[in-house]
Image (spheres, helix red, strand yellow):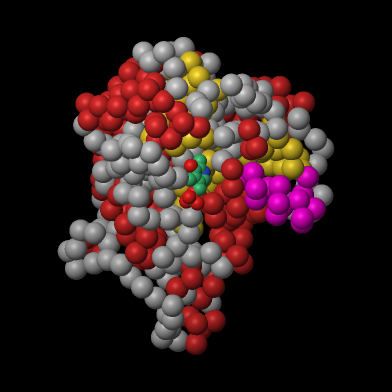
């Protein structure tokens, strides 16, 4: 499919599916996030899709009741699979990802678990990048292996040599780039090429870049996953996941697995994420701008040995990022001289604007100590170093620098 086709809003082939509400001409991503969804004409002129809550759906004829499951996750057939609110968001994300179809689920964790479960069965081998998010790894190691799936991890820097990791029973490759915690880039097209030749399905957790700054399906990935909890939502108050498939037959398998798992994204969550999507483009600009300012300042501090951020020219992932991605994000890692317990307390315990908390992608700046070691099998961190994870929020960067500067001053006094 060529590029203009992928950007069409009305990509659905089924007449029964809700349409996206704007003309199906070629639109830029910023316009898509601002406008894609259900049209005002479909709901009495209201711009935003209402929050439709439902469990029971009633049917006018016995035949329509008997046929109801033909349209699950696409039509309103039972509350579990979604309502118009869910499908409006699904159509918007589908347009943004350039997908054939998008499934909305209850969290990013659920999106990853459902995606992996869909494509492997007992006796199959699943190849996973060593840098994936912690719970993705736990699902593969603690759940899939109990159902007879072989799981192995590969170095994210492997490139085309991934062919040496592919076994006769390899069914799927799961990647995330840049990686959680250490932000390593992966040569996505190289992985895709090997996978295609071997008939292996490729899945990618693309939460860091958001579909605005990287579209995995455009480079041949089969399934693109977002923790909608992060940037799509953008306001730190929603759990949601999205699974976008380039092929209809993969989507059919994915929605079957989601349905069997009983997974359901609530209508309020779908509404809030759709609302968040409207400002995704302007928020990403600000996150990236603030991150660049914070990175520059941090690099000038003597305690900082490295900033882990592929958008930085000296980063080992820069060339791949520059070649494949349209932009960066607000999340990066900082390697520091090892912090004593007293230095850590002084640094973290009196922050003003920066908050310590998991998740990221919201309006607020975050800083947390990170420990990649227990989650890696292929790489390690120098034991005399500390690792921080920073998320640049939407605040004025001068205030953020003041806060960080005060933390560094406290830390210096404590050692
Ligand atoms: C947060 C995150 C997840 C999990 O998403 P939840 O919605 O918190 O379950 C998965 N992958 C990545 C890369 C994440 O950052």
Q: Position of residue 192 (x, y in %)?
A: 62, 31
Task: Identify the residue at horizontal 54%, vertical 81% (top origin).
Answer: 66
Could you say which is closer to the camera, residue 143 or residue 275? Answer: 143
Where does the C terminus fall, quadrant-wise? top left
Q: Position of residue 34 (x, y in %)?
A: 25, 45
Could you say which is closer to the camera, residue 77 or residue 9? Answer: 77
- Against 352, residue 182 (above or below) is above
Could you say which is closer to the camera, residue 287 or residue 160? Answer: 287
Q: Position of residue 307 (x, y in %)?
A: 45, 20
For this orientation, the residue located farthest to the left is 45
> Does residue 26 appear to the left or right of 175 in the view shown?
left
Task: Identify the residue at horizontal 74%, vertical 26% (top origin).
Answer: 163
> Does residue 94 appear to the left or right of 40 in the view shown?
right
Tell me the quarter of the picture where residue 203 sits: top right
> Does residue 23 appear to the left or right of 191 in the view shown?
left
Tell me the quarter of the picture where residue 256 sits: bottom right
Q: Is residue 61 visible?
A: yes
Image label count: 0
Task: Identify the residue at horizontal 17%, vertical 64% (top origin).
Answer: 45
* Main secondary structure of the magenta stretch: helix
- Against 55, residue 168 (above or below) is above
The span picked out in magenta is 136-150
Task: Identify the residue at horizontal 37%, vertical 22% (top origin).
Answer: 413
């Amino acid at each position: 499919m060529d590029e203009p086709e992928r950007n069409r809003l009305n990509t659905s082939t089924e007449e029964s599916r809700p349409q996206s509400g704007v003309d199906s001409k070629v639109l830029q991503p910023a316009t898509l996030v601002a406008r894609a969804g259900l049209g005002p004409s479909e709901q009495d002129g209201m711009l935003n899709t209402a929050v439709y809550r439902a469990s029971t759906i009633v049917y006018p004829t016995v035949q329509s009741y008997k046929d109801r499951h033909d349209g699950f996750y696409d039509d309103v057939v039972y509350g579990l699979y979604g309502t118009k609110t869910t499908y409006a968001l699904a159509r918007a994300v589908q347009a943004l990802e350039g997908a054939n179809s998008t499934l909305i689920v209850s969290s990013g964790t659920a999106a990853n678990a459902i995606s992996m479960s869909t494509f492997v069965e007992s006796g199959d081998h699943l190849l996973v990048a060593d840098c994936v998010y912690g719970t993705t790894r736990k699902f593969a190691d603690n759940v899939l292996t109990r159902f007879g799936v072989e799981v192995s991890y590969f170095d994210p820097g492997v490139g085309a040599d991934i062919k040496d990791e592919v076994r006769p029973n390899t069914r799927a490759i799961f990647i995330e780039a840049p990686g959680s915690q250490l932000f390593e880039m992966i040569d996505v097209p190289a992985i895709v090429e090997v996978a295609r030749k071997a008939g292996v399905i490729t899945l990618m957790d693309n939460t860091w870049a958001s579909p605005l700054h990287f579209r995995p399906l455009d480079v041949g990935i089969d399934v693109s996953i977002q923790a909608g909890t992060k940037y799509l939502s953008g306001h730190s108050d929603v759990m949601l996941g999205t699974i976008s498939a380039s092929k209809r037959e993969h989507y059919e398998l994915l929605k079957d697995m989601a349905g069997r798992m009983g997974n359901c994204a609530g209508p309020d969550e779908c509404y809030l994420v759709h609302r968040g999507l409207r400002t995704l483009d302007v928020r990403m600009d600000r996150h990236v701008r603030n991150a660049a300012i914070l990175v520059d300042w941090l690099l000038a501090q003597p305690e900082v040995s490295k900033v882990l951020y592929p958008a930085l020219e000296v980063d080992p992932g820069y060339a791949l990022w520059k070649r494949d991605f349209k932009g960066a994000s607000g999340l990066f890692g900082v390697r520091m001289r090892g912090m004593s317990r007293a230095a850590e307390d002084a640094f973290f315990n009196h922050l003003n604007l920066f908050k310590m908390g998991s998740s990221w992608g919201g309006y607020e700046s975050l800083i947390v100590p990170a420990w990649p070691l227990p989650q890696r099998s292929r790489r390690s961190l120098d034991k005399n170093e500390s690792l921080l994870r920073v998320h640049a929020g939407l605040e004025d960067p001068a205030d953020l620098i003041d806060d960080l500067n005060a933390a560094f001053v406290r830390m210096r006094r404590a050692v």
